[in-house]
Image: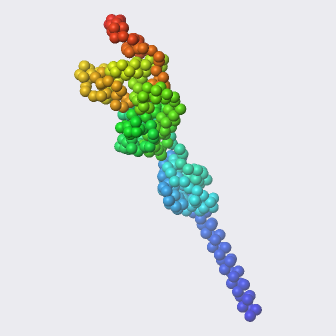
């Protein structure tokens, strides 16, 4: 009985010793393998090259390690996996696109892929007075991750639920006028609809505290004000002239005179870079404010805040006409009567000949 106990103790000691030998041998072999692979790969791999990889949602540590090894970022996927497990980052790897270098240190790779992909942003400048079409072109030009078809889908008014997109309880037909001009920071993960939503949200923010008492008193809707602001934006070059042009528009509306603002027709014809012809001026459309009284059907651009304020605060003057008398500064001269206006036009024409 005693001999049996001694035998069992010897057997247990032998098993433990053998296990330790196997474990040490395995670790020694693994270390040799790492050194061997490192020396082998270092001769084949050019270190320091930039490599882009995408760690997809749901990838296991093994798959990530294999991807890193395949791209030459690490020297051995198995050793990286073991090292990463020891560091406890197996569940801390964040999916995304990364730029790493070939032959990188394990710690550096782990630090990057557990911190998350870098935030990629684009500067987007929307100038005051841009039309929706011009904004679409700017988005396509400056944001390579946005598709034109997606932008056009995102411009559907029905995608958005803002009170200001209703005029007398009727939904407006398009978003012209509401895409607020500003310099924006756009993240790469934004969709086209996210970007349009950003413009609309900015419009709401900028206009929410404005005083609309003039509009209410004179039975103009907020959408009417935006139409007037868009015409002011296209007509005024000098800041101090905005309230004066605003006054001319309201004075003409009050007298039921056609506004005669050719920018509305330029908008309809999408003809901004060349003068309108005699044939153009005969175009039968509500946007031809020489032929039709009242405001155009929609705003003709996306005005800035100063033009919106001018539409809400016209100057207290009796002007009905204005004409550019300084082609360099685009300064206008204003007049109350057609006779006075024609005299200014004739004088300006003779001076510039």
Question: In screen coordinates, is 1 left or right of 187?
Answer: right
Question: In screen coordinates, is 108 left or right of 225?
Answer: right
The residue positioned 74% from the left and 94% from the top of the image is 1
Q: Position of residue 334 (x, y in %)?
A: 41, 12
Q: How many marks?
A: 0
The residue positioned 63% from the left and 73% from the top of the image is 22
Q: Is residue 208 above or below residue 322?
A: below
Looking at this view, name the residue that lies furthest to the right.
2
Q: Is residue 74 above or below residue 241?
A: below
Q: Is residue 141 visible?
A: no
Q: Position of residue 224 (x, y in %)?
A: 40, 29
Q: Position of residue 260 (x, y in %)?
A: 33, 20
Quarter-of-image position of residue 139? top left
Quarter-of-image position of residue 13? bottom right
Foreground pick, 292 / 73: 292
The residue positioned 51% from the left and 30% from the top of the image is 210
Q: Is residue 41 above or below residue 186?
A: below
Foreground pick, 172 / 25: 172
The residue positioned 74% from the left and 88% from the top of the image is 6
């Amino acid at each position: 009985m005693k001999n049996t106990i001694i035998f069992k103790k010897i057997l247990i000691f032998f098993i433990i010793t053998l296990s330790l030998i196997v474990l040490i041998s395995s670790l020694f072999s693994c270390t040799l393998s790492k050194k061997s692979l490192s020396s082998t790969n270092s001769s084949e791999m050019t270190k320091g090259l930039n490599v882009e990889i995408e760690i997809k949602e749901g990838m296991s540590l093994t798959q990530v390690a294999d991807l890193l090894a395949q791209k030459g970022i690490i020297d051995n996927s198995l050793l990286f996996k073991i090292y990463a497990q020891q560091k406890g980052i197996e569940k801390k790897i964040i999916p995304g696109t990364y730029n790493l270098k070939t032959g990188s240190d394990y710690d550096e790779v782990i630090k990057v892929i557990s911190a998350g992909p870098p935030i990629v942003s684009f500067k987007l400048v929307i100038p005051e007075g841009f039309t929706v079409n011009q904004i679409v072109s700017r988005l396509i030009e400056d944001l390579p991750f946005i598709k034109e078809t997606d932008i056009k889908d995102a411009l559907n008014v029905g995608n958005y639920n803002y009170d200001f997109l209703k005029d007398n309880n009727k939904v407006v037909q398009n978003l012209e006028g509401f895409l607020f001009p500003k310099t924006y920071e756009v993240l790469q993960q934004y969709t086209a609809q996210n970007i349009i939503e950003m413009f609309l949200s900015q419009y709401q923010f900028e206009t929410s505290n404005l005083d609309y008492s003039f509009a209410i008193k004179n039975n103009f809707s907020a959408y009417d004000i935006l139409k007037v602001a868009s015409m002011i934006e296209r007509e005024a070059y000098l800041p101090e002239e905005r309230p004066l042009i605003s006054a001319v528009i309201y004075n003409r509306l009050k007298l039921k005179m056609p506004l005669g603002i050719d920018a509305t027709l330029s908008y309809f014809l999408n003809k901004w870079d060349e003068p309108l012809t005699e044939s153009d001026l005969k175009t039968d459309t509500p946007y031809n404010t020489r032929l039709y009284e009242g405001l155009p059907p929609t705003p003709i651009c996306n005005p800035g805040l100063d033009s919106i304020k001018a539409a809400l605060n016209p100057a207290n003057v009796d002007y009905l006409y204005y004409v550019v008398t300084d082609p360099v500064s685009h300064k206008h001269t204003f007049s109350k009567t057609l006779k006075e206006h024609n005299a200014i036009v004739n004088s300006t024409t003779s001076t510039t000949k």
